[in-house]
Image: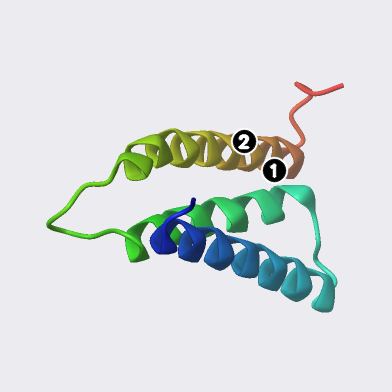
Amino acid sequence: MSTPRRLRFVSFQVAWQLAALFALSLFGVFSYGLFVLLSALGVVVAADLSSISRVRSRWRDRLRWAVAIALAGAVIAACVRLVELFGLELLP
């Protein structure tokens, strides 16, 4: 059975991603890179908001890997965007 904090984390992350998707499509600037960046930001914000300062639960230790993967995806998306902006011929 999932704990209430874990469910709160997942629901906040899903809401954050849906709001990011809606905002990007509303303003007409949707790209996968921006969506990944905003989703990674949502993971970090959700992890910070769902943390307890005194008690460390087991699922929070596993969350560290999810945050690391999200940040790696954000770095890759930012690098791809920089290559697109500067016109470097690194990508096919």
The span from disc 2 to disc 1 (Cα, nearest Å) is: 5 Å
Residue 69 locus on image (x, y percent): 52, 34
Indicate whether 52 appears above or below 62.
Answer: below
The circle on residue 81 is: 1
The residue positioned 60% from the left and 37% from the top of the image is 73
Viewer-side residue, 37 vs 68: 68
Residue 82 locus on image (x, y percent): 65, 41
Residue 68 locus on image (x, y percent): 45, 35
Q: Secondary structure at mark 2?
A: helix
Q: Are marks 2 and 1 in contact (CB under 8 Å)?
A: yes
Q: Which quadrant is home to the C terminus?
A: top right
The circle on residue 44 is: none
- What's the image's color scheme? rainbow
The circle on residue 79 is: 2
Indicate whether 58 appears above or below 45.
Answer: above
Viewer-side residue, 80 vs 34: 34
Q: Amino acid at mark 2?
A: Cys
The residue positioned 75% from the left and 66% from the top of the image is 21
Q: How many marks?
A: 2
Q: Is residue 79 left or right of residue 62?
A: right
Q: Secondary structure at mark 1?
A: helix
Residue 85 occupies quadrant = top right
